[in-house]
Amino acid sequence: MAMTVGDEKGGPQCEMNVTPLIDVLLVLIIIFMIIQTRSKSMGEEALVPQPPERTTDAPPFRTVVIQLVKTSGEKPSLMINQEQVAWDRLRSRLLEIYKTRAERVMFVKADSDLPFEDVAEVIDVARADFPDMKVGLITAKIESGG
């Protein structure tokens, strides 16, 4: 503790001793720091992201290739990623494939002997439900598996 007896002129001096006030202030700061760290609520509660549930379905093929294979009949046979599809089920099968996809890209692979009318029909069916569908054309001689 500091103490002053008087000033140079010999008279009494009135000066406040602030040393004990600073000690009290430091003790209060330490108490508030301890209270703050022991507090259990530290903001809003958040839910931790959970991993997705496992599904038994195989992931869909990213690339979709529709093959038109020339047959002895009037219409060529259709295959979507090596899966045989009838012409009347083409639209419903494409809806199943593309309903959850953000990226809509399809490749049409056809025999070079086929008229473009059949290829255009496949493209029209696909773009009827998905106007933003991007279509790539592949021309090749497709060997029939029969």
Image (cartoon, helix red, strand yellow):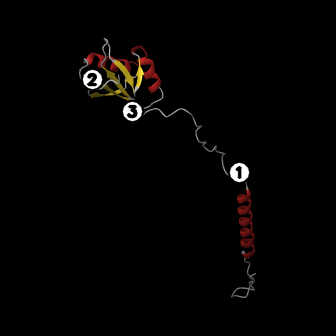
Q: Secondary structure at mark 2?
A: loop
Residues marked 3 and 1 touching at CB (< 8 Å): no
Where on the picture, by quarter, is residue 30? bottom right
Give the CA separation, mark 2 to mark 3: 19 Å
Residue 21 in the image: above or below residue 69: below
Q: Secondary structure at mark 3?
A: loop
**Amino acid type shown at disc 3:** Thr
For label 3, the residue is 63
Residue 111 numbered tag: 2
Residue located at (73% from left, 81% from top): 13
The x and y percentages for residue 141 are 26, 26
Label 3, residues with CA under 10 Å away: few <14, some 14-19, many ≥20: few
> In the image, is 92 to the left or to the right of 27?
left
Give the CA separation, mark 3 to mark 1: 50 Å
For label 1, the residue is 41
Q: Secondary structure at mark 1?
A: loop
Label 1, residues with CA under 10 Å away: few <14, some 14-19, many ≥20: few
Label 2, residues with CA under 10 Å away: few <14, some 14-19, many ≥20: some
Residue located at (72% from left, 68% from top): 25
Nearest to viewer (mark 1 / mark 2): 2
**For this rendering, which residue is in front, 146 or 7?**
146
Q: Is residue 144 visible?
A: yes
Earlier residue among tags 3 and 1: 1
> In the image, is 81 to the left or to the right of 50?
left
**For this rendering, which residue is in front, 128 or 90?**
90
The x and y percentages for residue 116 are 26, 18
**Amino acid type shown at disc 2:** Asp
Residues marked 1 and 2 touching at CB (< 8 Å): no
Residue located at (73% from left, 88% from top): 10
Earlier residue among tags 2 and 3: 3
**Amino acid type shown at disc 1:** Ser
Q: Is residue 16 visible?
A: no
